[in-house]
Image (cartoon, helix red, strand yellow):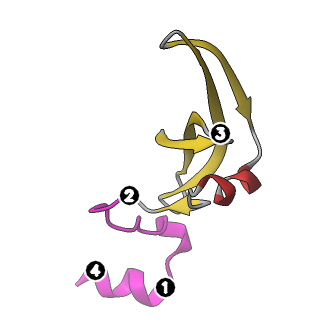
């Protein structure tokens, strides 16, 4: 979850991890309605197209995390051969 705003209200941008690519993809914006300093209501918008309007990127790779390696069956035969020695 990434803090942001939507229409001047506090909000959270939620991302889901694509396990095949290691990239976080936009999932939902959750807008908080506050009353007397407490959360009165949470409205979720499962519309990734809204992310840029909230100043959030539609996808992100976690910092410091290497790109995942392709599954063994997805590697070429040359790559598999070079690993054998």
Return the mark for residue 84: 4
Disc 4 to disc 3, C-alpha distance: 47 Å
Q: Residues within 10 Å of mark 1 (few under 14, many from 20)?
A: few
Q: Is residue 54 left or right of residue 84?
A: right
Badge 3 vs badge 1, beta-carbon distance below 8 Å: no
Badge 1 vs badge 2, beta-carbon distance below 8 Å: no
Q: Residues within 10 Å of mark 2 (few under 14, many from 20)?
A: few
The residue under label 1 is 77
Viewer-proximal residue, 5 or 69? 5
Disc 4 to disc 2, C-alpha distance: 31 Å
Q: Is residue 22 visible?
A: yes
**Image quarter of residue 80:** bottom left
Disc 4 to disc 1, C-alpha distance: 11 Å
Q: Is 75 a magenta residue?
A: yes
Give the residue displayed 63% in from the left and 32% down from the top: 30
The residue under label 2 is 62
**Residue 68: horizontal and vertical position, in percent?**
41, 64
**Segment colored magenta:** 62-85
């Amino acid at each position: 979850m990434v803090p942001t705003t939507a229409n001047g209200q506090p909000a959270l941008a939620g991302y889901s991890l694509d396990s095949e690519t290691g990239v976080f993809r936009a999932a939902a914006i959750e807008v908080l309605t506050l009353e007397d300093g407490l959360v009165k209501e949470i409205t979720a918008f499962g519309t990734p197209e809204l992310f840029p309007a909230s100043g959030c990127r539609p996808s992100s790779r976690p910092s410091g995390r290497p790109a995942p390696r392709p599954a063994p069956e997805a590697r070429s035969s040359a790559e598999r051969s070079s690993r054998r020695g």
